[in-house]
Every structure is written in C-alpha cells, then in structure tokens.
C-alpha cells in the first residue's frame, strides 16, 4: 500500500475644495478581498496488484525452480526481509525477468525504492512489455513524486492490459499533480466506472473538477457526497471553496460555518486561515458582529511558531485582521473595531512592528471619534515609533497637530510623509491647507504645483491654484 499527499480653510472657498480631495487610504477596503479556503491535504491510498495477466506475464527459467520453491513459504508468510536476504545471495544479472520483477516488488515492500527502480528497469531490459514491471515502476515514481515518469509507466500498463480501477485512479492522481485537469477527470471517472463506491476516487474527481474549473459538475458531485456523509467537515470546506470560486458568498458562508461547527463538535481544531476567510466574508456581506465574534473567539489560533522571530519564537499572523480593522474604521463601525482592538491587546508582543503600528493608527481613530485627542496623539506617536514609515500615522498626526495649532510639528510630520511615494500627494495637500490657514499663500501655491506635477489630472487642484494665484496678485 502506498500513501502520499498530495488571498479646512477659513478665509477662502478654495480651501474647502482642497480638503474635499483628500480620500482616506482605507477606501481601498471597499474592494473585494481575495479570499480562499484552506483544505487539508487528502491522503491517497494506492494498491499495487501483484497478479500478472495474459502474454505480458514473465516465466521463471527452469534453473530457477529450486530457488522459487525456497521463496514460496516466505512469500506466503509475507516475510519480505527474508526474501530479500535470499535475493542478496544472487547476482541479478543471472536472473530472469520474472525474478528481477519479484525482487523489485519485494524492495518496494521494504521501502527501498531506489534499489527497486534498478531491479524493475533491469527486468524491462529483458522484457520491455512486462506489464507488472511497468505497474510496479509507476508506483516507485509516484512515491518519489516523479510524476512524468509515473504517468509514462501507468500508460504503458494500460496499453499492456493491466487496467483496473487502481491504475486508472492513480493515472488520474498523477495527471492532477501535473495540472492536467481534463486528463485527471477522465482517469477518475473511469476508476469510478469500475469501482463506483470508492470514496477516494470521488474525492479525486472532485479535486480534478475544481482544478479544471468545472464548478457546476463539482457542485453536483459534492452535493451527492454530502447526502451520504453530511457530517464530513472537509466536504463542507470543499463546498465553501466551490461557492467562492463561483462568487456565491452567502453559500460560502453557510458552508464554512457548517464546517466550523462540525469540527468543533468533533473536537477538531479549526484552521486559522479558514476562520479568517469566514470573518472576511462576513465583513464583505455586512455582518461585522459575526466577523468580530470569530476573531475574538479564535485569536489564539493566529499565533504561530516561527524560528528566529524573537518573542519566544512566535509571530502574530495579522494581515487579514488588519484588513478587517481597516474596513471597520473606514465604515465607522466603531463598536466592533473597539472590540477587536481590545481583544488584540494581550497579543501586542507577538505582533510585528509593522502591524503594531497599523493597529495603533486604528486606536487613534477610535480615540478621535470619542473626542479624546490626547489618547489619539499617544497612539499615533507609538505607531510612528513602531514603524517610522507608516504614512497614514504621519499624516493623521500632522492633521491632529494642525487642529491643535501646533503648526511647526504638523509641518514636520507632513514633510516626513512627503518622503513616502504612496503618501506624497496627500501630504502636500495637507501642508497646502495648513499654509492657507496661516495665510501663507505663496507657500501653498508652491505645494499645490507640486501636486499637479505628480498628478496632472487633478482639475480641482488646478482651480485652487488659479484662485490662489489671483489672490496673491491682488495682494501684491
């Protein structure tokens, strides 16, 4: 048996326009996030049938009959080690194709695959059409994950008449590994035709159909499998994956929720990636509360051991949680955001400096919403300390300093944000607004002209430049 496993101006109307052009970076979160379902690698069990058939069967030489009689009781007892010891006293070059083939099969049983490959190839030099030598050699190559060679010998086995359900199923498996979806489907379908109750071939066909993006067929097959085994959490995960690939988010949610509940009932730990995917789906479909509940209940799963990462070898997997927090902040869902941030607090030491900085920005936004500018300032300073290149933190703190009439500090933070390509335009606009509020119109003009150099399509900024230019000329 073989086993393998295989997402703000006060004095000029012009300044109100400037502010209107500022768009939060979090707006990008309105776009769908790439979500996928993580499936457990299936365990494939392949059988090596040792019964040759027809004209492709090798015969022992007359001189080998005595040795064969010695092997018979060992073969009956499946004492492969003793059989191999007997073979070790013989020179393979003097053996017939039949004995070379038997040697290869015993070596496979002993998991001595390289030696088995040599013996089986040797048999084929004497009898190129020895079907079971091709069959056994295909098994060796499958174990070694040499799928092109495995396919060659499986195809040869079929040509020579060894064509049972195992051979077709294994050929389907090999083609699936080689990303030959259509061929894999054909192999599994034929295996099922010969062995219709084999659940392994059904799972293989399901994988092949998904791989070939034949989602309707995969859905039909899967629904039938669920009727037979409705408590199989892996099948519900597959159903969720198919639904996602088809854009059926509500069906994906119900499927993933079913898988989560079944695993919980059976004492199986749910995969952290799948919980994150489910939380993202709930966010996208308007159920922020359920998303937060999922994260809150399973935060400990998002701590992973990583060698050389510090903090006792642990690192916090935070990218998806960051996306959810970003969505909540942009959509002003302050209560669920606060709930997530409170739940994250105990894991701060396991979070990378990059995500620590980002979560501190969300804390600052939450504090600002509550009117607590002191707490917001503290969070923003902490954010910048953790990641000096966090442009969102720099700009948010600059705006806060601006609102507190601490212009010198505001300019410092805007200037730092200007050095970051992604935030340069927003920083220039923020500084321009500050200079207008200070009635430093010439300075503001220079900053707005830099914006136009970066983004010539900003017609609103061009209109502001024209208004400011007229004002400067009138004052001179």
Image (cartoon, helix red, strand yellow):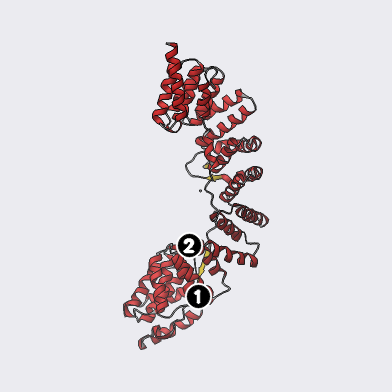
Looking at the image, tell me whether mark 2 or mark 1 is earlier in sequence order: 1
Task: Identify the image quadrant of residue 378.
Answer: top right
SS under mark 1: helix
Mark 1 residue crowding within 10 angstroms, few (<14) / some (14–19) / many (20+): many
Q: Is residue 451 above or below residue 263?
A: above
**Residue 176 image offset from top left, x and y in percent:** 46, 64
Residue 327 is at least partly visible in this image = yes
- When asked about the image quadrant of residue 81, the answer is bottom left
Q: What element carries label 2?
A: loop
**Image quadrant in which the C terminus is located:** top left
Q: Residue beneath label 1, please?
A: 165
Give how far apart the Cα atoms at labels 2 and 1 are.
22 Å
Q: At 40% across and 73% down in the image, what residue appears?
A: 155
Q: In this view, does 13 lie above or below 361?
A: above
| Residue 150 horizontal side relative to residue 245, left or right | left
Residue placed most toward the observer, 374 or 89? 374
Residue 255: quadrant of the picture: bottom right
Q: How crowded is mark 2: few (under 14 residues within 10 Å), some or many (20 or more)?
A: some
- Name the residue: 36% across, 88% down: 62
Q: Which residue is situated farthest in the right direction here? A: 265
Left or right relative to 138: residue 340: right
Residue 212 % position (x, y): 48, 62
Residue 280 in picture, x, y percent from top left: 58, 46
The single residue placed furthest to the top in the displayed view is: 476
Q: Is residue 90 left or right of residue 44?
A: left
Q: Are marks 2 and 1 in contact (CB under 8 Å)?
A: no
**Residue 42 higher or lower than 105, as above or below:** above
Instruction: Residue 84: tell me if it is visible.
Output: no
Comparing 42 with 442, the one in front is 442
Q: Total of numbered circles in the picture?
A: 2
Q: Residue 212: which numbered mark, if any? A: 2
Disc nearest the viewer among 2 and 1: 2
């Amino acid at each position: 048996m073989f086993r393998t496993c295989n997402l703000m101006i006060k004095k000029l109307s012009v300044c109100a326009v400037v502010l209107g052009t500022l768009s939060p970076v979090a707006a990008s979160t309105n776009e769908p996030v790439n979500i996928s379902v993580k499936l457990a690698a299936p365990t494939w069990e392949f059988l090596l049938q040792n019964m040759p058939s027809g004209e492709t069967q090798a015969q022992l030489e007359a001189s080998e009959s005595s040795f064969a009689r010695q092997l018979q009781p060992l073969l009956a007892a499946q004492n492969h080690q003793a059989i191999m010891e007997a073979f070790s006293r013989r020179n393979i070059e003097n053996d017939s194709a039949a004995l070379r083939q038997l040697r290869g099969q015993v070596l496979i049983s002993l998991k001595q695959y390289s030696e088995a490959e040599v013996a089986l190839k040797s048999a084929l030099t004497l009898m190129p059409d020895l079907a079971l030598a091709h069959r056994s050699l295909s098994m060796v190559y499958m174990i070694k994950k040499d799928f092109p060679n495995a396919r060659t010998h499986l195809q040869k086995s079929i040509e020579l008449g060894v064509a049972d359900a195992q051979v077709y199923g294994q050929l389907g498996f090999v083609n699936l590994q080689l990303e030959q979806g259509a061929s894999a489907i054909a192999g599994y379908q034929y295996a099922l035709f010969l062995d219709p109750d084999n659940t392994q071939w059904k799972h293989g066909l399901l994988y092949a159909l998904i791989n070939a993006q034949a989602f309707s067929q995969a859905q039909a097959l899967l629904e039938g499998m669920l009727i037979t085994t409705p408590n199989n959490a892996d099948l519900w995960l597959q159903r969720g994956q198919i639904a996602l690939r088809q854009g059926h988010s509500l069906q994906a949610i119900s499927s993933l929720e079913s898988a989560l509940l079944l695993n919980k009932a059976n004492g199986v730990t749910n995969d952290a990636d799948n919980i994150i995917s489910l939380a993202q789906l709930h966010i996208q479909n308007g159920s922020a509360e359920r998303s937060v509940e999922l994260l809150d209940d399973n935060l400990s799963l998002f701590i992973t051991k990583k060698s050389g990462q510090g903090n006792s070898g642990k690192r916090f997997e935070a990218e998806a949680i960051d996306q959810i927090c970003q969505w909540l902040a942009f959509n002003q869902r302050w209560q669920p955001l606060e709930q997530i941030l409170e739940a994250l607090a105990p894991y701060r030491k396991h979070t990378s400096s990059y995500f620590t900085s980002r979560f501190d920005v969300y804390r600052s936004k939450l504090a600002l919403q509550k009117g607590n500018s002191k707490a917001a300032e503290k969070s923003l300073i902490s954010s910048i300390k953790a990641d000096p290149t966090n442009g969102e933190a720099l700009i948010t703190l600059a705006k806060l300093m601006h609102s507190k009439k601490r212009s010198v500090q505001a300019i410092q933070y805007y200037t730092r944000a200007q050095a970051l390509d992604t935030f340069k335009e927003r920083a220039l606009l923020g500084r321009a607004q500050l200079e207008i509020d200070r009635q430093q119109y010439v300075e503001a003009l220079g900053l707005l002209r830099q914006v136009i150099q970066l983004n010539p399509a900003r017609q609103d900024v061009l209109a502001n430049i024209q208004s400011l230019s007229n004002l400067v000329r009138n004052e001179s």
